Image (tube, rainbow, N blue to C red):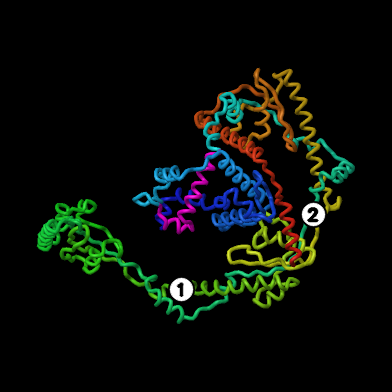
């Protein structure tokens, strides 16, 4: 099965696409009015509703697929209002395209579906030799042949809606040149930097300047003390349970005895053979003739065992091993046909078999060597077995404890002591926990889902336990706030030094900008007076760390005809730059392959055309989207709080 997966990755990807195709494939557009009657509508396409239930189901499927593909990722990252809104947009788009396929009569006929299945190489692994569908493979994916056919039909039909637009869209050559020029064009420039830090000594802001900056509402966020909480929490994890488990030696020995094969090296044998071919379906006379020839060769081999390899080279009809003197290298049980295997595993090194008959013909086997078959001693694997048994017991105990943990922190939500006493856990404390974890935060409070629960309305207002949150594999945490400090603006005196540094930097940048702009105007009139750095070549396609992005953008945006030309770049708090554009250079061929760039631009143009056509289809089918992910999330939060 695993070999099949490795060999047919693209096929499996296609089948997965069909598996995750929305459920409305089966019902069709007409079936939705009765199926969803009475359910909350979040969108309409051509008068047909997309319901809240469909939206929720589609989003759950997306989160589950994300977790399956990336087991270590926090699924909470995908369960945001923005991601939920994207899910709804995706549902609407699929419904629009399906509607268009039906309205435009683009349905795939049975004949075309059969022809595509029979002729497309992509489906070769799904076809039996007679051309029929391999139902057992689909069954392993949870699909019937009817479901596969219907989903494939819908997929083929909907692809036709945008395929014609994407396949025929052609961007104008002039537009392509302009677009590619904006990315790949190179210019030789010289720069003069007016760095703000060199002007810092020239500014001396007054206390009034500092107070005005501090009081400006636009700057309030710079002087905020973050929201913080002191918390206590309990953690249930598999490792802690495992550390308290001991295993009796009798149990270890029993496991060793019951799983003897796991601790034995499989026996392998190296043999050579001479094959006289005789297919099992060959006439009896031909097989007797082949057997007689094998008997003759066996007699020769017994007379001169040392010459077996030479005898095999001259007489064996096995093309794979004859040139090597019949050598088959080492093989284990199950690698050869049974008659051959039974004979090879009954010989001692150096011994010859009799004539062995198989479906391929008649063999003469000589055993060269035996390896493996040794059993690792108990003492060598004792620690390994103990660890495995402790892991098994810990997993069982963790599953039982996790249910107790989850129920207790919810049912006795005013304290963590009951769950700690019941499961013999330690109640730990932590100070200065913030709503957003810092980059160096470790442990459970780096988990955004736990922090969201901790800083939720119910937890902050009522000081209740959070729900049991899975912060890692086999790790559950519940926490409660003991003290909460809302975000607040720090007093002026406490941040005065920071305010002064900020104001000095801004005033210095303003001085640098003023002088830079003055020099720009002066050098435009008298270029010989300009003091510039050595010339460099810049482009958007090859940014460098040495040249600020603002300088590159200003240099490439400025009209360069006639050259030389001048431009200025505001570097914000860093200062100002004066730029002289000496000349425009051709595109760098190492970066801008002409054919590939044109192809990429054509793809982008086709995507834009397809998007425009989709927008027109939305208008045609009167799409209305009423679902709001943020509002839905708020409602869920309220419901969650009320249930407590």
Number of the label disc, if any, that sits on residue 225: 2
For mark 1, what is the residue?
385
Question: Could you tell me which secondary element the residue under label 1 belongs to?
Answer: helix
Q: Badge 2, how many Cα within 10 Å: few under 14, some, many 20+?
A: some
Left/right placement of residue 55 relative to residue 270 reads right
Assign the N terminus to one quadrant of the image.
bottom left
Res. 280 image quadrant: bottom left
Could you say where residue 171 lies in the image, as x and y percent from the top left?
57, 28
**Residues at discs 2 and 1 in contact (Cβ within 8 Å):** no
336 or 184: nearer the viewer: 336
Taking the spot 79% from the left edge, 65% from the top edge, the residue there is 483
Question: Could you tell me which secondary element the residue under label 2 belongs to?
Answer: strand
Could you say where residue 338 lies in the image, as x and y percent from the top left?
26, 64
The single residue placed furthest to the right in the displayed view is: 208
Asked if residue 242 shows in the view, the reply is: yes
Q: Is residue 122 magenta?
A: no
Could you say where residue 179 lies in the image, as x and y percent from the top left?
60, 28
Q: In this view, does 484 lie above or below 149?
A: below
Could you say where residue 314 lies in the image, as x and y percent from the top left?
14, 52
253 or 474: nearer the viewer: 474
Of callouts 2 and 1, which one flags the residue occurring earlier in the amino acid sequence?
2
Spatial CA distance of label 2 from label 1 is: 53 Å
Taking the spot 57% from the left edge, 70% from the top edge, the residue there is 239
485 or 55: nearer the viewer: 55
Left/right placement of residue 423 relative to residue 388 reads right
Asked if residue 439 shows in the view, the reply is: no
Q: Is residue 93 above or below residue 525?
A: below
Q: What stretch is highlighted in magenta?
A: 133-161
Q: Is residue 139 magenta?
A: yes
Assign the C terminus to one quadrant of the image.
bottom right
């Amino acid at each position: 099965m695993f070999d099949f997966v490795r060999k047919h990755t693209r096929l499996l990807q296609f089948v997965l696409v069909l598996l995750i195709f929305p459920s409305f494939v089966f019902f069709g557009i007409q079936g939705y009015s009765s199926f969803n009657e009475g359910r909350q509508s979040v969108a309409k396409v051509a008068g047909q509703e997309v319901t809240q239930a469909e939206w929720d189901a589609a989003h759950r499927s997306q989160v589950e697929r994300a977790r399956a593909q990336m087991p270590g990722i926090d699924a909470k990252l995908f369960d945001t209002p923005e991601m939920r809104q994207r899910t709804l947009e995706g549902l609407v788009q699929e419904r629009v395209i399906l509607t268009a396929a039906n309205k435009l009569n683009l349905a795939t006929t049975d004949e075309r579906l059969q022809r595509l299945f029979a002729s497309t190489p992509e489906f070769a692994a799904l076809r039996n030799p007679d051309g029929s569908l391999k139902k057992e493979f689909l069954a392993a994916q949870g699909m019937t042949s009817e479901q596969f056919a219907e989903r494939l039909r819908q997929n083929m039909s909907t692809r036709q809606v945008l395929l014609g637009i994407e396949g025929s869209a052609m961007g104008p050559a002039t537009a392509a040149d302009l677009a590619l020029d904006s990315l790949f064009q190179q210019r030789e420039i010289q720069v003069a930097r007016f760095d703000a830090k060199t002007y810092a000594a020239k500014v001396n802001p007054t206390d009034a300047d500092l107070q005005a900056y501090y009081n400006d509402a636009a700057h309030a966020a710079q002087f905020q003390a973050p929201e913080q909480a002191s918390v206590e929490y309990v953690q249930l994890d598999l490792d802690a349970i495992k550390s308290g488990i001991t295993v009796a030696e009798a149990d270890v020995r029993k496991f060793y005895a019951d799983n003897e094969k796991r601790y034995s090296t499989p026996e392998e044998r190296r043999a050579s053979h001479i094959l006289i071919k005789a297919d099992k379906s060959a006439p009896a006379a031909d097989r007797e003739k082949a057997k007689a020839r094998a008997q003759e060769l066996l007699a020769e081999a017994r007379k001169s065992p040392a010459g077996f390899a030479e005898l095999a080279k001259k007489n064996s009809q096995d093309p794979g091993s004859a040139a090597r003197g019949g050598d088959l290298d080492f093989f284990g049980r199950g690698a050869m046909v049974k008659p051959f295997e039974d004979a090879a595993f009954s010989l001692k090194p150096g011994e010859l078999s009799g004539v062995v008959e198989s479906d391929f013909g008649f063999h003469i086997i000589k055993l060269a060597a035996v390896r493996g078959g040794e059993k690792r001693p108990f003492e060598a694997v004792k620690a390994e077995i103990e660890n495995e048994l402790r892991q098994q017991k810990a997993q069982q105990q963790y599953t039982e404890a996790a249910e107790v943990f989850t129920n207790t922190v919810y049912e006795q939500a005013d304290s963590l002591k009951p769950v700690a006493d019941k499961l013999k856990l330690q109640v730990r404390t932590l100070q200065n926990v913030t709503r957003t974890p810092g980059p160096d935060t470790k442990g459970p409070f780096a988990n955004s889902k736990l922090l969201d629960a901790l800083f939720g309305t119910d937890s902050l207002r009522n000081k209740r336990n959070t729900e049991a949150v899975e912060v890692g594999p086999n790790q559950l945490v519940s926490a409660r706030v003991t003290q909460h400090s809302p975000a607040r603006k720090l007093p002026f005196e406490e941040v005065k030094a920071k305010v002064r540094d900020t104001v000095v930097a801004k005033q210095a940048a303003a001085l640098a900008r003023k002088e830079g702009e003055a020099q720009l105007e002066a050098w435009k009139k008298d270029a010989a007076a300009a003091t510039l750095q050595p010339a460099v070549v810049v482009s958007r396609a090859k940014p460098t760390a040495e040249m600020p992005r603002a300088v590159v953008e200003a240099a490439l945006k400025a009209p360069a005809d006639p050259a030389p030309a001048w431009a200025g770049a505001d570097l914000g708090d860093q200062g100002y730059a004066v730029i002289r554009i000496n000349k425009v250079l051709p595109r760098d061929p190492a970066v801008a392959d002409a054919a590939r760039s044109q192809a990429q631009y054509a793809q982008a143009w086709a995507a834009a055309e397809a998007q425009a056509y989709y927008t027109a289809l939305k208008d045609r089918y009167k799409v209305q989207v009423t679902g709001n992910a943020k509002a839905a999330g708020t409602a869920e939060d309220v419901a969650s709080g009320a249930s407590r």
